[in-house]
Every structure is written in structure tokens, then in C-alpha cells.
Image: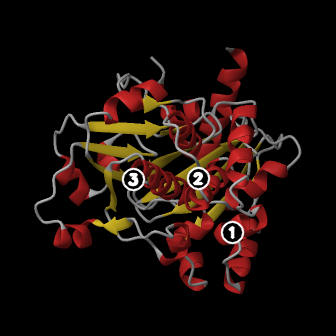
């Protein structure tokens, strides 16, 4: 049974469906849940999108039908609500949906994950997990097609945007001919690629450019230039009145460097340092991140590094880069 068949069988007896995504969602999770909700309504289901927090203003243009609600807002208008099925998109663990939603979900067995992130050591065969898919939005799009539902513009724009975000504008190695075939069908609804791109990326102010310049000025490489990194300090975000959400793509600027194998961004969060990893395609940074206590895809991953007392950010970086070099040597020798 394919994951498309699994999805269809799981929703057949469900009349009331709640869809959510991980806490602090990006446009990949948001776009996926919106499009799936609209499709399931066309399929005859009572369907709602409920997230831990209300939709940020920057993403509201994706939700033309206003289907996304914050948990507290939703409870006020649906105090006795119960669902036959809860669908979680773009993650495969309920621990990531937020405290209130996590408690609401509880230990229900009526839970279905749709995701493309690895789920090492867990049996999720009754869910819709495809780690080879370029994006969760791609899986959702293929599910909608499998249900025989025709795309309209309200559905197409959120999925298209989700795929743009999850593939870093189609640059990751998981992008396939199937990805582009789906995109072709989305474009047939009349969405405009420039409009979609500018909607998600073209909403910055000049201070964002100043912050990007400051962060890129921290760029460094190891001796053979196979590893490059940038450093993001809290004072830089505060100085430019920035949002952490605005910094996620900064790391991708390193992937154009000659000889680059692994790109890193270190974000100083005080007691811990958040490290994001990107791969040029040759090395599996997901495996490296797992070894460092994190996780992710082969081309995009992250981990949290606990700082020792009085340890500077520079000391954390030097120690971590040394571990990365060792990990690359081990991968080359395997």
C-alpha cells in the first residue's frame, strides 16, 4: 500500500478532521495544511486548521479562505469540539506541535502524520512519510491529486509556496521530475511564479539587508574551504529589529562558495547555540546532525549545542568545526 492509499483509507470514516503543523511554522507547514484543508472540504469533510498560535501577518496572504486558527481562538468558538482524525503536517512527532495542542491531542490513536523528515527507529508505516519527497507540500499535492480533487488557485498558491520554501527555490537534490510535474499543474491554475516568490521573499525592509550584510561579514571557512560558516548573535537581531524567521535562509548564501561541502550557521541563544547545516549534495548532513544530537534531512539539518560555563561563541564554533571535519573524514573513509 502506498502512502497515497494509506491516506485515502485513513480519511474514509473520518467526518470531522483537524489539521495542524509544528510550532513556529514556516510557509512549508502552513501552505501544506491550508491546501489540504481546502481539498478535504471539497471532498466532503468538515475540516479545520488549528495551530498553537494564530497565523503571523506575513503568512496571511496564503490563507485566502481564513481556515487557520490559533488554538485559544478555536476553543472559544468550538469549546466542545472533537475530531475523528488529527492530521499533523511537516513533522512526525506531536512533541513539536506546541504545549496546548500536544495536550489536546493527548494519546489519541486517530493521528496521521504527513511528512518528509526522517523518523529513525520508529514505525510510522500507518502514516504518510516519504523522506525522498522534496517537500511536505509535494506529498500533500500528490495526495490531493490521488483523491481526484482538481486544484484551484486558492489551493495551488500555498502548495507552490511550501515547495519553494522546502526546496530553497528548487535547489536541493531531492527535487525531482515529479516535483516539477506537480508544479506545472499548480501553475495551470493561474498562479504567477514572480508573485508567489515575492510574496514569501519580497516583503523585507532595508534593515533586513543591513542585517544580512552584517551576518555575511562573519563568513569564515576551514583551511581547505570545504566547510564554511556564519555567526548570528542575538544583539544583531535586536540591533536591526529583526525576526529569527528572517534569518533562516542566510545560510544558503554559503552554498555558492567554491569547494564547499557543508555550510553552517551558528545562532547564539545564550546558554545554547543553535547550529543549522546545509549540504552541497555530496555529504549527508542529517547523519552528521544526528551524531551531534540533532536531526534533519541529508541536505538540511540542525542541532543544539549546549555551552559550557564561560565558553565563548568562538570556542563553541572552533570545537564544533573540528568535530565536523572529523565527521567528513569518517564519511569519506566509509
Residue at (78, 66) in percent of width and height:
194
Per the image, label 2 sits on a secondary structure element best described as helix
Residue 136, position as x, y percentages in the image: 53, 43
Residue identifier under label 3: 41
Residue at (73, 38) in percent of width and height:
181
Question: Given contact means CB atoms under 8 Å apart, are the residues at marks 2 and 1 in contact?
Answer: no
Q: Mark 3 packing: few (<14 Cα in 10 Å), some, or many (20+)?
A: few
Can residue 229 be seen from the camera position used here?
no
- Indicate which disc, 3 or 1, sits on the residue closer to the N terminus: 3
Residue 114's image quarter? Answer: top left
Residue identifier under label 2: 159
Residue at (38, 22) in percent of width and height:
125
Residue 153's image quarter? Answer: bottom right
Per the image, label 3 sits on a secondary structure element best described as helix
Gap between marks 3 and 1 measured at Cα: 29 Å
Select label 3 or label 2 by which is in front. 3
Amino acid at each position: 500500500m502506498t502512502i497515497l492509499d494509506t491516506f485515502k483509507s485513513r480519511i474514509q470514516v473520518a467526518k470531522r478532521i483537524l489539521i495542524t503543523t509544528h510550532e513556529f511554522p514556516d510557509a512549508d507547514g502552513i501552505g501544506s495544511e491550508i491546501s489540504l484543508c481546502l481539498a478535504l472540504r471539497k471532498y466532503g469533510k468538515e475540516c479545520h486548521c488549528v495551530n498553537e498560535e494564530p497565523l503571523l501577518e506575513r503568512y496571511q496572504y496564503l490563507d485566502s479562505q481564513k481556515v487557520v486558527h490559533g488554538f485559544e481562538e478555536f476553543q472559544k468558538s468550538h469549546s466542545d469540539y472533537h475530531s475523528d482524525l488529527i492530521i499533523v503536517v511537516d513533522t512526525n512527532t506531536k512533541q513539536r506541535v506546541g504545549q496546548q495542542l500536544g495536550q489536546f491531542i493527548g494519546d489519541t490513536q486517530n493521528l496521521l502524520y504527513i511528512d518528509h523528515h526522517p523518523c529513525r527507529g520508529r514505525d510510522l508505516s500507518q502514516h504518510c512519510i516519504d523522506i525522498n519527497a522534496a517537500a511536505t507540500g509535494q506529498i500533500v499535492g500528490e495526495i490531493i491529486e490521488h483523491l481526484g480533487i482538481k486544484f484551484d488557485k486558492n489551493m495551488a498558491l500555498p502548495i507552490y509556496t511550501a515547495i519553494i520554501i522546502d526546496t530553497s527555490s528548487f535547489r536541493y537534490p531531492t527535487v525531482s521530475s515529479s516535483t516539477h510535474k506537480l508544479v506545472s499543474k499548480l501553475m495551470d491554475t493561474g498562479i504567477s511564479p514572480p508573485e508567489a516568490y515575492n510574496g514569501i521573499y519580497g516583503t523585507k525592509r532595508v534593515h533586513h539587508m543591513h542585517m544580512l550584510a552584517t551576518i555575511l561579514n562573519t563568513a569564515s571557512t576551514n583551511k581547505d574551504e570545504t566547510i564554511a560558516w556564519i555567526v548570528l548573535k542575538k544583539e544583531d537581531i535586536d540591533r536591526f529589529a529583526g525576526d529569527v524567521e528572517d534569518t533562516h535562509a542566510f545560510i544558503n548564501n554559503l552554498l555558492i562558495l567554491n569547494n564547499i561541502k557543508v555550510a553552517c550557521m551558528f545562532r547564539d541563544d545564550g546558554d545554547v547555540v543553535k547550529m543549522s547545516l546545509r549540504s552541497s549534495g555530496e555529504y549527508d548532513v542529517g547523519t552528521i546532525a544526528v551524531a551531534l544530537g540533532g536531526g534533519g534531512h541529508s541536505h538540511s539539518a540542525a542541532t543544539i549545542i549546549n555551552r559550557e560555563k564561560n565558553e565563548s561563541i568562538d570556542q563553541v564554533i572552533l570545537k564544533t568545526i573540528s568535530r565536523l571535519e572529523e565527521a567528513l573524514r569518517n564519511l569519506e573513509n566509509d
